[in-house]
Image (cartoon, rainbow, N blue to C red):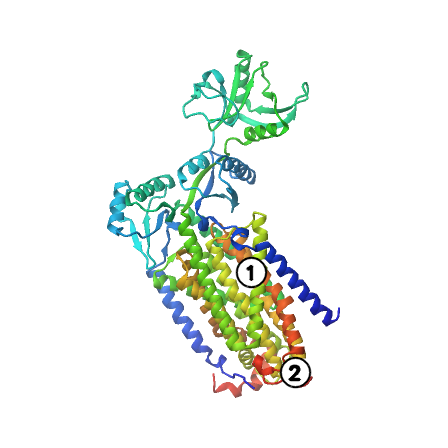
Amino acid sequence: MRRTAIDLMGKRNWFFLASAIIIVVGLISLFTKGLVFGIEFQGGTVMTFQAQSGVSAEGIRTSLEKAGVADARNATIQSTQDGTFLVRTTESDPTKASDAFTAVVADLALPAQDITVTTIGPGWGRSVTNSALLALAISILSILAYISVRFEYKMSLIAVLALVHDAIIVLGVYSLFGREVTPNTMAALLTILGYSLYDTIVVFHRIRENSRNLQKQTFMQMANESINQVLMRWVNTSLTSVVPVICLLVFGGETLKDFAFALVVGQLSGAYSSVGIASPIYALWKEREPKFQALKKKYAKETAKAS
Amino acid sequence: MDSKTRNVVALVTIVALVAVSWWLFWPLDEKINQGLDIKGGVQVILTASPIGNTQLTEDSMSRTEAILTERVNGLGVSEASVQRQGNDSLLVQLPGIKNSEDALDALGSTGRLDFVDMRSINTSENLVYGVKLPEGSYDTSGVIVAGSSVKSAGATIDTQSNQPAVSVDFDQEGRDQWGAYTTANVGQYIVILLDNVVQSVAQIREPITDGSTQISGSFSAEEAKRLSAVLQAGALPVDLKPSSTLIVGPTLGGESLRQGLLAGLLGLGLVALFMLVYYRGLGVVSWLSLAVYLSLLFGVVALLSRMGAFALTLPGIAGLVLTVGLAADSSILIFERFKEEVRMGKTYRTAAKSGTRHAIGTSVDADLVTFVSALALFLVAIGPVKGFALMLILGIACDLTVAILFTRTVVVLLAENVIPKAPWLFGLKGGGTDA
């Protein structure tokens, strides 16, 4: 019979320490380096096109100047590995931007069907952020309500705590890597908040099931056993969720990579936090209940060494 | 219903659903609408702000939407659409258009509705409905009343001729101007213009001083309705500014689609391989579950496409790839619980029954929590995010259907008939006896 018996709960302080370090590093980076926001948050124009032979960054810049783009000298021109050019200017008037880029296309003799031009007005990022924050508030409240009804309120509060943990880690990683935050990032982040709870729910389900007739064991020991019982499904569901998204991160185009990065970081963090953060904190909290306190007094010795 | 009947019903239902889905979505590229970021075109998000000291209301937004829809249709683009997003935004999609400038001009302008003296219009064009006059064909001195003075308009029936007609009410200022003009110019013609496009030409039959005007003529009921809609809502009640404009060339969009699908297929392949290696025979069951899952999802998406309620966007593809993992997760929960109960010494048959029931309970909770956040995202968020959230919502619904009807039933049937004969094929070491 194949059965794991790893004392994961006994190592809880190491998990807490690891999370604390990642979060502190992330927060320091967030406060010092901050986040890089995409043009969606500042207003501006991005043109994307397939590189043609003989087109260079300097050539594009000259053509932007010829087209009368005000900040042509400051335009960011970026070529990606798969042979596309990304040209960014701060022009936020769509008509002007469209004019300018039509001129550039003509000047560089680019095939017009290969081009994407995105122009964002200055207020757009704010609207997107506001709607995202509203969505966040609604989903947190609904998740709290759902878990409170289906499980219990302590589980719901801890699930949300784990979710905040994951969100801070994702934002911290964005800041550390200097990755651009776009509305797509926000969407991915919000989804992750729901999705990172998947593993937490799987573990909580088992803990609840096992806690019904808990005898001769502390709550912590039982929680540890529960995690071990669902360990393989935790590993496997995390793997099968993260693998497709990693493929997207490696092989998808610009827009898809945008989603995939936040999803990958969030899923990894979510998988970890369900076992490393949510479960031990829940067990610690439950052990304060009189019923489980009694069990703890009686049976805690056996694991005293481990923790 | 005994369990045998239930299994048969479940399988028949799922086979029927898959058949309907295939009928709905095949061939894929024709039956599933593609979003603008994939097939190319112009997409503008217009954000409204109130004019003067008015406020944005639900009413003014829906009027704006109606007017924009009218204008977009006027551009002659097939499959053009206008959708509300959030409280103050409108998403306008013009597939296939290459030049955004004309489109932007036509959409963004607040719209000018004028009642003009025909004599003051300087043009060689025939003044009939739909003709667009060149800019500068008339100036403000020829304008008798501006559209902003229209208080209300409606389609009615002329009581004398029994013909469809349009009634117009002006506000106090319009009433005065209108009264003075009609008194002095009986017999003259008035042209109603919206953004320089002729909407109607009418003759003044008598002085109208009470502000309540009836325009009658050889209207059909439809035309009367259209004219009253133009009069009622001709000028936009809000100020519109483009807050996001996306112009996509068709080749580049197609390339992104190809990359996304390739990445998705690779991910699917890796997941399938993992499932086979780890779960052996049950892995093959998970392949079938994934195939059924994708069939149902594409079926629903094709159905929504047919109703004009869905278009596959790049964010949608990201959502699709994410749900593939979600669907595999449901199979894993079922298999693991089943194997666990077998290890506990239950017979395959009992383990399958109680294991799948427990696993689906877990699945429902875990899926619903994701569902809740996807739903919040879909209802509240604006911009490209909606496509992502919708795909997640549909994916979760299909996933639960497949887990409950298909995966559970197949595992139960296998546990009764196949697994006891060849447990090694499923990575199992022989079950116990019924406890």
Residue lying furthest front in this view?
B27
Q: Which of B364 and A113 is in front in this view?
A: A113
Which amino acid does the dot numbered 1 rest on? Gly
Residue B434 lies, in percent from the top left, at 69, 84
Q: Which chain carries label 1?
A: B
Residue B370 sits in quarter: bottom right
Label 2 sits on a secondary structure element that is: loop
Identity of the residue drawn at 59% across and 58% down: B22
Where is the N terminus of chain B found, in terms of image quarters? bottom right
Residue B402 lies, in percent from the top left, at 61, 65
Disc 2 to disc 1: CB gap under 8 Å: no
Q: Nearer the viewer, residue B241 or A293?
A: B241
C-alpha gap between disc 2 and disc 1: 33 Å
Q: In this view, does A95 lie above or below B220?
A: below
Q: Is residue B366 above or below residue B41?
A: below
Mark 2 Cα-neighbour bin, 10 Å: few <14, some 14–19, many ≥20:
many
Residue B33 lies, in percent from the top left, at 52, 50
Q: Is residue B70 above or below residue B115?
A: below
Identity of the residue drawn at 54% across and 68% down: B328
Identity of the residue drawn at 55% across and 52% down: B31
Q: Mark 1 points at which residue?
A: B395
Mark before the other along the chain sequence, 2 or 1: 2
Q: Name the residue under label 2.
A: B346
Residue B77 visible in the displayed image: yes
Q: Which of A2 and B178 is in front in this view?
A: A2
Residue B300 sits in quarter: bottom right
Mark 1 Cα-neighbour bin, 10 Å: few <14, some 14–19, many ≥20:
many
Identity of the residue drawn at 52% across and 73% down: B275
Q: Nearer the viewer, residue B252 or B59?
A: B252
